[in-house]
Image: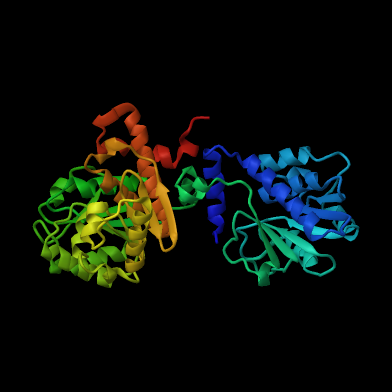
Amino acid sequence: MMDFEEVAVLDRNAEALGVPTGELMENAGRGLADAVVESFPDATSVCILCGPGNNGGDGLVAARHLHGSMKVKVVLPKGREGVKTELSRLNLQRLPEDVEVVGLDGLDRALNGTDVWIDSLLGSGIHGSLRAPYRDIVARLGSGERPVLAVDIPTGMETDTPYVPHMTVTFHDVKTGMNEKKCGKIRIVDIGIPPDASERTGPGELLLVPRPRSSSHKNQNGRLLIIGGGPYTGAPALAAMAALRCGVDIVQVATPKLAHPVVAGFSPDLIVRPLRGDTELVADDLNYLLELAEMSDAVLAGPGLDPGEATGAALREFISKYDGPLALDAGAFPALAGDPSFLKGRKGVLTPHLGELARLGYPLVDYSDEARVDLVRKAARDTGMTVLLKGAVDLVVHGDLVKSNHTGNPAMTVGGTGDLLAGMVGAFLAKGMGPWKAARVAAYVAGSAGDRGFEFRGYSLVASDLLDIIPEVIWADILTPG
């Protein structure tokens, strides 16, 4: 079952794999037409109500394929000028000339004169209340006058005025919330999305990153607390800078006393808070850390932390009292060794490599792909967290959901790239993304930045080279000239 955001992700990933969105729409419309013919063999006419977006485009393709086998009428509630997407406009132009196309003023005549009605209006992602004219149209669709076939999901399914069609033709997989009580008989149509589009990360993952509203102000686009540093000072600084490059508004780094001036000296963009211990976390830091966490939307703990007993005890106590989104990396893992179930009920992401995963109690004995997936799935199940296993091919596991990430290159074995990745995970959690989506996006962005960096640094790449490239990956659509 897919949530609605994942539909756009799949389309973008499929396009990157060589299957254009236009081909997917063509396959969807053809599958829809086949469903009409097979499900309503006695029908001689059909009315297809097409909305302004690509859901309407699917209906327009179906109209072309149904033409010749039955009488086809198309209703555009917003008129021809209301068709908004390029693909939908193209398929409107491709309709045979004798297909009758009417606007809202011809709605009643079109509905009354046809045997089957097709709802290709608004598709997924519509919540709250439907606006005119769709609210009245949906009421008519639910009147029971004719059998209705909905495209992808019934228009208004998630609003306060839903209706139940005779059947729903949905594409690739059922969508979140769909069942026969809401959708009638459900028919799934394969539209040719390659398996890798759903099994691997791709540029579609970038569509999951929240865009700031034009009216937004400071603190509305994510506040991240990083607990790190001590013996290692570069790690929390790199994580913090990577988080800022992902578009969060505020990053605070809480670090032991002796590390504070070094970490603060990396950049004036960093807000660095000194803790009481010289090089490690101590029990007296707990209240202050919880106070800082209260002012944050997510916490990343681990980059550069001392792995000793004092740090482990303080960190476990912090985790037991903090219930917000949490990312754990590197120096945080010794605190969990032998008891990863301590995290059960927490919401967040673990970012280990194979060695750290083994120290958590999950050693990899069989190096086959299947065994690797099974092991990470067990760690995710035991902890209740999303697990992002770093490697030549990253593996992201959340419950039964699995995706691999194939971006990145051998130059990224250099120290610090894992800290960048952890900072990105923390940033996306702070921006309100769920752990499964945050981990996937971070893995894709980190590897893609590394691939771009490799083009001009080769095997001399260092982690800080990637900081200026991260925005180019995430915001490519708004940073590309023209």
Q: Nearer the viewer, residue 376 or 299?
A: 376
Res 284 visible: yes
Residue that appears at 49% across and 46% down? 196
Towards the viewer: 375 or 288: 375
Query: Residue at 50% of width from left, 38% of height from top?
Result: 477
Which of the two residues, 168 or 129, is positioned nearer the viewer here?
A: 168
Residue 394 drawn above or below residue 284: above
In the picture, measured across the screen, residue 252 lies left or right of residue 197, that is: left
Q: How is the image coloured?
A: rainbow
Asked whether, in this view, residue 125 is left or right of residue 247, the answer is right
Residue 21, given in percent of the width and then of the height, sits at 61, 42
Q: Residue at x 36, y 41 (%)?
A: 447
**What residue do we see at 40% from left, 54% from top?**
438
Relative image position of residue 406 (x, y in whole percent): 39, 43
Q: What is the residue that sits farthest to the top in this orientation?
A: 456
Q: Position of residue 432 (x, y in %)?
A: 42, 58
Quadrant for residue 387, please give it: bottom left
Q: How many marks do you count on the picture?
A: 0
- Whether residue 219 is visible here, answered yes or no, is no
**Which quarter of the figure is the N terminus placed in?**
bottom right
Residue 362 drawn at (x, y percent):
26, 61
